[in-house]
Amino acid sequence: MELVSVIVPSYNHEKFLEQRLESIFNQSYPAFEVIILDDCSRDNSRAIISKYRSHPKVASIVFNEKNSGSAFIQWKKGIALARGKYIWIAESDDYCDLNFLETAVSKMSQGYRLFYCRNINIDSEGTPRENQTRWCDDLIPGRWQADFENEGREEIREFLSLKNTINNASAVVFRNEPALQDYLGKVMSFRYCGDWVFWLQYLDAPGKLYYSCAVNNY
């Protein structure tokens, strides 16, 4: 089995953090390591994270003494520590179906460079509010209601150049490649849309992506 490096950038999400971590540790796919990076949270996040220090899946826990000011600095730091063939940025206020990684790796092992799945918006109490596929319906209504594949550069030309159709990093698994550090170096100063620019850089290379509506990110 290929190893997945799960990077959890944490900041002031104590209300959601335990659910986030449990949705990772209980994945049906067993070959993963977890790297937790807390960006000097002011709430109880550090204490929650510390409870998992001895968990066998935890490879690294990093507590910043000063807030970095950028989620992408945390991404870059986490990827530098990652040993896995694949990367999953699991944001600390999200959670996912327990077969998320199993579904993702089954596709990545077929040669895809990037996998992502359907997003379901939830409120602060965890109640589903909206299927985020509606965000993309003005491009092609219903496209994101079924699985599809596409060449990365074709996806950019047709869709991703128009709006950020990969609109939540927690829904994405992608290959760990040396160029990731360069891509992230170009977005570390972004306050908004840095993830969009990252996907544009990453997919501007030969290879295909796969989208699945059979598994959900919340």
Image: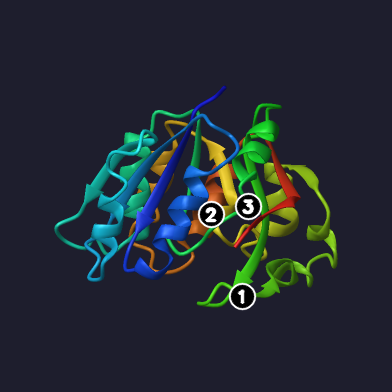
* Kind of residue indicated by mark 1: Thr
Q: Nearer the viewer, residue 207 or 108?
A: 108
How packed mark 1 is, by other alpha carbons closer than 10 Å (few <14, some 14-19, many 20 or more), is few
Residue 44 in view here: yes
State which tag comes first along the sequence, 1 or 2. Answer: 1
For residue 59, which quarter of the picture?
top left
Q: Where is residue 34 in the image (x, y as percent from the top left)?
A: 39, 40
Above or below for 26 versus 85: below
Instruction: Please give the residue where the numbered disc 3 appears in the rendered image.
Output: 97
Side of 109 where 3 appears, left or right: left
Q: Where is residue 44 in the image (x, y as percent from the top left)?
A: 26, 67
**Which disc is residue 127 wearing?**
1
- Assign the C terminus to one quadrant of the image: bottom right
Instruction: Please give the residue where the numbered disc 2 appears in the rendered image.
Output: 170
- Tell me which residue sits at (25%, 51%) in the image: 50
Q: How far apart are marks 3 and 2 (CA)?
A: 11 Å
- Tell me which residue sits at (32%, 61%) in the image: 70
